[in-house]
Amino acid sequence: MECFLRSFSQGSPLGIMKLSPSVFGLTPRADLMHRAVMYEEAWRQQGTESSKSLGQVRGTTRKPFPQKGRGKARVGTLRAAHFVGGYAVHGPKPGPRMPDINLKVYNSAIRHALSTKYAQNQLVVVDSLSLPNDLKLTLAERLEMLGIRGKKAYLMYGDLEPAEHLVRSADKFLSKPKTEDVPHGEKRLLVSSADLVSVLPVLENEVLVLDKAAVELLEEMYAMEELNAV
């Protein structure tokens, strides 16, 4: 597998870079990616929702009607679930609700997410994501040269040190529609290290931009010897 290695400063091709088929060349499996996305969305839940039980609902404890003689159903409390203001049956309670997922399945979902971006021609590999300053215009010009300005992009670097200029510059991008002042429109950018890759950001962003070090790190972390393995 191969792809163009492009210059981040000029946008022009610098050469051809080989990619690992076990990381970027798999046939995408929606079932694995769905399990991983549900697992990651559970991270965002606080798990603090709570409904009141019968003993916690405010109200009288007396028996509202006689047990017999009315010709109607017996009623023991006005705080029952079928009355207005009653307690909730099997309502939510605080606690972890994160679905269980095997590490091998999650790592495989990351491979399939990366392969999806390659298959959809939404993967851009550049030599480096370094910037000389943290100006918004500098990053906007480089995105323009890559042909992805105005798109929701996920920029991933492979260095251990954080790309401070890149992060500060990307934080200045906001979601804006196309106008005369902003002809390309503007969408938020996500920047992270390759060792923090997850499935949901890869899939929900229109373009995945990797530098050469990020590709090498991802292949080191997720490459497999057997291509027929999930």
Image (spheres, grey):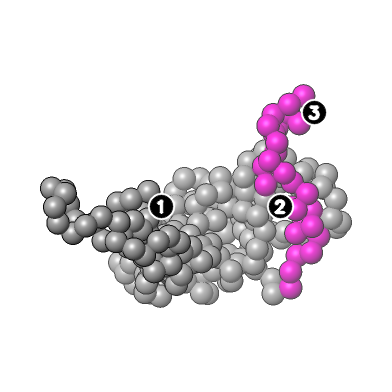
Q: Write the residue at 69% across / 74% down.
A: 160
Check residue 149 in the rendering and tell me which mark sits there, or answer none. Answer: none
Circle 1: residue type = Gly
| Residue 99 at x, y percent in the picture | 38, 68
| Residue 226 at x, y percent in the picture | 34, 72
SS assignment at label 2 = loop
Q: Which residue is mark 3?
A: 181
Distance of mark 2 from mark 3, alpha carbons? 28 Å
SS assignment at label 1 = loop
Disc 3 versus disc 1: nearer the observer = 1
| Residue 96 at x, y percent in the picture | 44, 72
Q: Which residue is mark 1?
A: 85
Q: Is residue 102 left or right of residue 149?
A: left
Lower position in the chain sequence, tag 1 or tag 2:
2
Q: Write the residue at 69% across / 29% down.
A: 178
Distance of mark 1 from mark 2, alpha carbons? 64 Å
Instruction: Look at the image and tell me whether residue 208 can be seen.
Output: yes
Q: Does the magenta-highlighted stretch encompass residue 13? A: no
Circle 3: residue type = Asp
- Say whether marks 2 and 3 touch (CB < 8 Å): no
User: In the depicted view, which residue is nearer to us: 225 or 78?
Assistant: 78
**Over which residues does the magenta segment extend?**
161-188
Q: Write the residue at 71% across / 60% down.
A: 128
Q: Residues within 10 Å of mark 2 (few under 14, many from 20)?
A: many
Distance of mark 3 from mark 1, alpha carbons? 54 Å
User: In the depicted view, which residue is nearer to us: 151 or 217?
Assistant: 151
Q: Which residue is mark 2?
A: 7
